[in-house]
Amino acid sequence: MAGKIKLNKTAVITIANSKGGSGKSTTASMLARTLGEKGYKVLAIDCDSQMDLTNTLGFTVDESLVEFGLTLIDFNKTIYQMIRSKGDVRDFIIPTKYKNLDIVAGDDYIGRIEFDLHHEYQREAILKKIMKDLVAENAYDFIIFDTSTHLGDLAANILNITDHVIIPVPMAMFGIRGIRTFIDFYNQFTEINENLSILGILMTMYRPNNKIMNERAETLLTNIFGRELLFRTRISIDANIEKAQWNNVTAVDYAPKARATVQYHDLAKEVIKRVKG
Ligand SMILES: Nc1ncnc2c1ncn2[C@@H]1O[C@H](COP(=O)(O)OP(=O)(O)OP(=O)(O)O)[C@@H](O)[C@H]1O
Ligand SMILES: [Mg+2]
């Protein structure tokens, strides 16, 4: 693709916030789609038992959802079995119908993985072992993890192999306070994983007309993180996001010209520049 910035190695990005409903899965799917459209090879990995990322990219493990157009995947090929069996991630990758975009699909068992593995030695390094060959061969420009709000062994595994964290923050005060819990957890991993850093804070569900709330939210975020860490791109509240998800697609496909879609394309450009450094 003309003008495409070349990346030298796979960038592992985790979308995280211990506040629920903050826009994690939406950001994961929209970034995966927009980066893929821009010619970058992307692997999306769904680590949340709600499977929003998996559904939005067209897959399910639930037979009853097939009639809504989702493709049924074998439960033996999803994230739970991958971690449980400590298989090589490359055996669990499924191509999506979208350009440059593959997935390791989620399932509703992933929530019990911590119980299953609680007796394992070095259980916080399992994902690292499973993924090291794929990461080393630089087959993907981006690997994008969608995560749940739970900060336990699985989140620890993910942060152990993450280069860049993106924290979506909805523009409401309670949303901003919620990120402190994640930051406290994140801080425990910066010494263990020297590649780990925060790529940026993404203001989501932004209401352009609500000046007072926006100013307060921005001041609070700037005080916590510093202005440079805030992405310039903000994602507005846009009904097309939810409508798209009801149709099991992303807004890139449902409403390519919608405000939030354009903003996520802008975010992808910022992400590429920040990853390149
Ligand atoms: N920019 C937006 N405009 C309007 N609705 C949005 C926007 N971003 C996300 N939503 C909606 O808000 C809800 C929460 O978003 P999302 O599922 O991405 O959050 P999450 O952080 O992944 O949630 P969870 O913690 O439950 O995994 C969803 O219904 C989604 O469709
Ligand atoms: Mg989610």
Image (cartoon, rainbow, N blue to C red):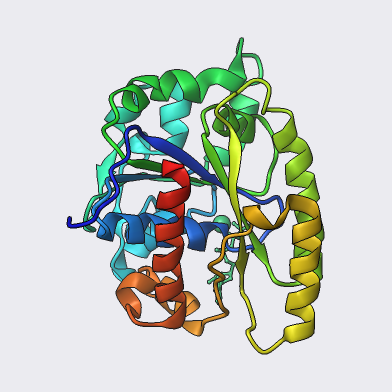
**Which residue is rendered at x = 38% and y = 50% of the image?**
61
Q: Residue furthest left?
A: 1
Q: Decide which of 128, 232 is in the foreground and name it.
A: 232
Q: Residue 144: x and y, percent?
A: 44, 45
**Which residue is rendered at x = 76% and y = 76% of the image?**
215
Q: Residue furthest top?
A: 121
Ligand 2 is found in the corner quadrant, namely bottom right
* Quadrant containing the N terminus in the rendered view: bottom left
Q: Residue 9: x and y, percent?
A: 34, 32
- Is residue 71 visible to the viewer in this orientation of the structure? yes
**Which residue is rendered at x = 51% and y = 83% of the image?**
239
Q: Is residue 146 above or below residue 227?
A: above
Q: Residue furthest bottom?
A: 209
Q: Residue 26: x and y, percent?
A: 50, 63
Q: Is residue 240 above or below residue 35?
A: below
Q: Decide which of 19, 265 is in the foreground and name it.
A: 265
- Is residue 144 visible to the viewer in this orientation of the structure? no
Residue 136, by quadrant, is: top left
Q: Decide which of 189, 232 is in the foreground and name it.
A: 232
- Left of 220 or right of it: where is 195? left
- Left of 162 or right of it: where is 130? left
**Which residue is rendered at x = 75% and y = 59% of the image?**
222
Q: Is residue 234 above or below residue 13?
A: below
Q: Residue 170: x and y, percent?
A: 67, 67
